[in-house]
Amino acid sequence: MENVADYKEIVDVIKESGGEAFKHCYQCGLCDTVCPWNRVRTFSMRKIIREATFGMTQVEGEDIWRCTSCGNCPRQCPRGVKIIESGVSLRRIATEYGVFPTSVKPIRTISASLTGEGNPLNEKREDRAKWAEGLSVGAFKEEMEILYFPGCYLSYDPRLKKVAVATANILKKAGVNFGILGNKENCCGESIRKTGDEELFRRLAKENIKTFIDNGVKRVLVSSPHCYHTFKNEYSEFMVNFEVLHIAQYLAELIDAGRLELNTEYAKKVTYHDPCYLGRHNDIYDQPRAALKAIPGLELSEMPEARENSLCCGGGGGRIWMETPKGERFSDIRLEQATGVGAEVLVTACPYCITHFEESRLMLAEDESNPADNGNKLEIKDITEIIQDALF
Ligand code: SF4
Ligand code: SF4
């Protein structure tokens, strides 16, 4: 990327997606101060985009792939600079030129899996509904109350399939008339878009939208905040209109309406982690807490960084598919914060957060030098798994 034409292209793309706003940056550096990367290493998104504006960014480098799109810096920037969008523009250039540093190379395999099978996990499309076998969960029909869209990780990942099962059990217990799309469901495309593959995102989105329209879907229930964000805020670019609910919202709605009776005591100390795409990006803070507070015996405490100040797990912006070396994982810090407030259970509502927290839990349990030595004691749960325990 050393010729002038390529640099000009970078600048043009940045201008298209926020570069005009970036001109207003007065280099205050607040974005770098609040960025979670600066808890574990030196990193400056401000510098990357500043250099790109003057055609000096190294697109081959690792740094343009670091931003987890956690939403912390844009929320606090006094000049309204579109920092995430500008970073994604640089990735679009790198993707177009096929320039990937070693840690980012898995993206190629992931793109192939998304294109061929509709999921990033190299799993077969026809196995997408296997998690529901034996649960009497049927195909969605137009007259049903709601479509349940579990997403890729809950459909295939062995740990996260338990969350899909818990969700189905809860919906049945509440008497919700719901169905699934099975192998007609595709990845929502949120994360691949953040890695810069706009074309693949648009293809996945269009296929999902066509399936929703063909099947008469009007209300969609999702388990992943990434599906929620994309369906709600990005699919609207395609002029479609359907209601989207995250399970954390729906649980509060079902409890409020008296459709779920939480009779079994859950006598544990619990702390709730706000996923970036539920909290900061979509302002959903109260409903998951209300659902947890409705459980008898549950003691909820807050970590120092909660709600809009929540610490990112490290999985957004496509980072879920990239290796993060030991000592640089935000999730390790989050587990220490959870044990620091005396929690026995760290609960959240996002498959990426659960994946990262489970990995950190295992690492910390194995690490005998870990002073907290709590990795093996802390449980990691999705909110549905706790509600299920309180129902049955
Ligand atoms: S917070 Fe905003 S104005 Fe300040 S350096 Fe970052 S991008 Fe520029
Ligand atoms: S969005 Fe989050 S991870 Fe990305 S640069 Fe801003 S603070 Fe850092």
Image (spheres, helix red, strand yellow):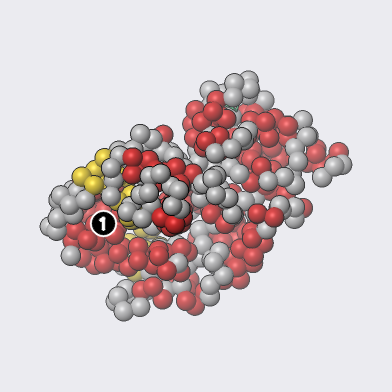
Of the four image quadrants, the one with ligand 1 is: top right
Badge 1 amino acid: Ile
Residue at the image position 29 percent from the left and 58 percent from the top: 384
Q: Give the x, y percent position of residue 288.
A: 29, 46
Q: Going 18% across and 61% down the picture, which residue do you hit?
A: 391
Q: What is the tally of numbered marks visible in this picture?
A: 1
Q: Can residue 176 be seen?
A: no
The C terminus appears in which quarter of the rendering?
bottom left
According to the picture, the residue beneath numbered tag 1 turns out to be: 386
- State which quarter of the image contains the N terminus: top right
Residue 8, compared with residue 247, is above or below; it is: above
Q: Horizontal and vertical percent for residue 350?
A: 41, 53
Where residue 74 appears, as percent x and y from the top left, is: 53, 32
Residue in front for this viewpoint, 379 or 45? 379
- In this rendering, position of residue 316 left or right of residue 383: right
The reply to whether residue 27 is visible in this rendering is yes
Q: Residue furthest left?
A: 263
The answer to whether the beta carbon of the residue marked 1 is less than 8 Å from any atom of ligand 2 is no
Residue at figure coordinates x 24%, y 57% from the top left: 387
- Residue at coordinates 31% horizontally, 63% vertically from top-left? 167
In the rendered view, does 63 fall on the left or right side of 375?
right
